[in-house]
Image: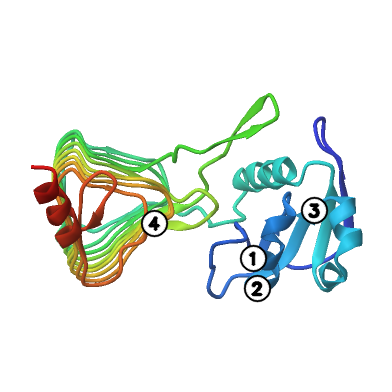
C-alpha cells in the first residue's frame, strides 16, 4: 500500500476500531498506534489497548515483541499514521452520520446555526441566537447555550514532518451531558482521533472559555471567564478553575481541585489540591514564596 509521500507495507493483519497515541488509554477500544522513537517502545508494549503498530523496518527487526501485533512498515511512521487517519476521517470509520434529532421541547433560536446532520439536542434545552452547533455534537437535557458560542469546532492539530506541515482532520465528537450551562462566546472543539470532548453532568462555563479537542470535564466543575484548556486535558469532579487560568495539553486535574485565577498549569494536579501561579504550584508554597520576596 502506498501514496505519493509515504510507502506503507502491511506486515501482519489486525482488527482495530480507532487510532491513538501510545501514551494514552482507550478503554474498550482496539487501537492502531505508531512508534518513530524507540524511547516509546515500553509505552507501546505496556498499553494493552494497542493491537496494531506502524513502525520502521529497523524497529520491527529489533524487537521480537512486535510480532504479536498487526504491523505496518513505513519509512516515516508518524506521517503514515496521520495520513491513514485523514483517509479514515473522510469515511464513517469513527462514527456514523445520522439525521438531526432535536427535541420539540427545546427552544432553539431561529438565529442559531445548526449543522445539516449528526446533531442531537435533548429535552428542555435553550439555544440562543448566534450559537453555532456543528455536526458530531450530542447535547443532553436541560442544557443552556448562550449567544456567540461555537460547539463542535475543528481541533487545532497540525503535524510537522521534516519540512512539511500536515493538517490533522478532526474526526471526533462533542458530548454535552444534562444540565450543562455554557455562557457567551465559548468554543468547544470536537475530539481529533475519533475520540470525544466531554462536558459531564452539571458543568458550568463562564464567558470566553476555550475547551480544546479531546478534553474531559467532570461533573459539577465550574470554569470561569477566559479559561483556556489545551488538548487532551482531564478535569475531575467538583473543580473550580479561576479567571484566565491556562492548562497545558495532556494535563490531568483530579477531583475537588481549585486552580487560582491566572494560573498556568503545566503539571498534573492531585485531587483536593489548590494551585496558584505561573507556573502553577501548590497554593501554600506559592504564598510562602511571595512572602519571601517582599
Q: Residue at x 14, y 56 (%)?
A: 288
Q: Secondary structure at mark 2?
A: helix
In-image side of 156 versus 4 (left or right): left
Q: Is residue 244 above or below residue 216?
A: above
Mark with earlier residue (4, 3): 3
**What number is the disc on residue 251?**
4
User: Pointer 2: what residue?
Assistant: 46
- Residue 242 is situated, as x and y percent measured from the top left of the image, at 14, 50
**What number is the disc on residue 160?**
none
Q: Nearer the viewer, mark 1 or mark 3?
A: 1
Q: Are marks 4 and 3 in contact (CB under 8 Å)?
A: no
* Separation of residues labelled 1 and 3 (CA atoms): 14 Å
User: Which of these two is toward me, 126 or 51?
Assistant: 51
Q: Residue at x 60, y 57 (%)?
A: 21
- Residue 158 is situated, as x and y percent measured from the top left of the image, at 55, 35
* Separation of residues labelled 4 and 1 (CA atoms): 18 Å
Q: Is residue 51 above or below residue 204?
A: below
User: Pointer 1: what residue?
Assistant: 43
In-image side of 39 versus 274 (left or right): right
Q: Secondary structure at mark 1?
A: helix
Q: Is residue 171 visible?
A: yes
- Residue 88 is situated, as x and y percent measured from the top left of the image, at 65, 48
Q: Are marks 2 and 4 in contact (CB under 8 Å)?
A: no
Q: Are marks 1 and 3 in contact (CB under 8 Å)?
A: no
Q: Is residue 180 visible?
A: no
Q: Are marks 2 and 1 in contact (CB under 8 Å)?
A: yes
User: Which of these two is toward me, 27 or 36?
Assistant: 36
User: Pointer 3: what residue?
Assistant: 55
Mark with earlier residue (4, 1): 1
Q: Residue at x 54, y 62 (%)?
A: 24
Mark with earlier residue (1, 3): 1
Amino acid at each position: 500500500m502506498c501514496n505519493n509521500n509515504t510507502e506503507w507495507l502491511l506486515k501482519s493483519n489486525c482488527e482495530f476500531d480507532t487510532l491513538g497515541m501510545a501514551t494514552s488509554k482507550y478503554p474498550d477500544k482496539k487501537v492502531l498506534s505508531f512508534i518513530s522513537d524507540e524511547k516509546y517502545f515500553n509505552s507501546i508494549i505496556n498499553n494493552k489497548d494497542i493491537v496494531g503498530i506502524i513502525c520502521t523496518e529497523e524497529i520491527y527487526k529489533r524487537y521480537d515483541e512486535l510480532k504479536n501485533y498487526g504491523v505496518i512498515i513505513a519509512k516515516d511512521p508518524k506521517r503514515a499514521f496521520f495520513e491513514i487517519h485523514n483517509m479514515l476521517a473522510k469515511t464513517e470509520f469513527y462514527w456514523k452520520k445520522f439525521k438531526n434529532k432535536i427535541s420539540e421541547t427545546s427552544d432553539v433560536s431561529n438565529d442559531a446555526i445548526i449543522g445539516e446532520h449528526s446533531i442531537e439536542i435533548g429535552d428542555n434545552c435553550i439555544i440562543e441566537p448566534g450559537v453555532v452547533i456543528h455536526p458530531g455534537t450530542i447535547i443532553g437535557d436541560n442544557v443552556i447555550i448562550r449567544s456567540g458560542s461555537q460547539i463542535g469546532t475543528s481541533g487545532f492539530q497540525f503535524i510537522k514532518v521534516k519540512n512539511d506541515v500536515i493538517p490533522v482532520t478532526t474526526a471526533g465528537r462533542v458530548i454535552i451531558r444534562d444540565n450543562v450551562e455554557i455562557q457567551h462566546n465559548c468554543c468547544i472543539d470536537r475530539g481529533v482521533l475519533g475520540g470525544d470532548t466531554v462536558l459531564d453532568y452539571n458543568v458550568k462555563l463562564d464567558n470566553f472559555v476555550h475547551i480544546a479537542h479531546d478534553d474531559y470535564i467532570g461533573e459539577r466543575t465550574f470554569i470561569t471567564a477566559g479559561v483556556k484548556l489545551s488538548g487532551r486535558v482531564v478535569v475531575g469532579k467538583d473543580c473550580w478553575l479561576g479567571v484566565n487560568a491556562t492548562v497545558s495539553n495532556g494535563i490531568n486535574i483530579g477531583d475537588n481541585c481549585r486552580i487560582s485565577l491566572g494560573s498556568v498549569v503545566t503539571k498534573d494536579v492531585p485531587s483536593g489540591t489548590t494551585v496558584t501561579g505561573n507556573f502553577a504550584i501548590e497554593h501554600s508554597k506559592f504564598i510562602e514564596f511571595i512572602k519571601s520576596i517582599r
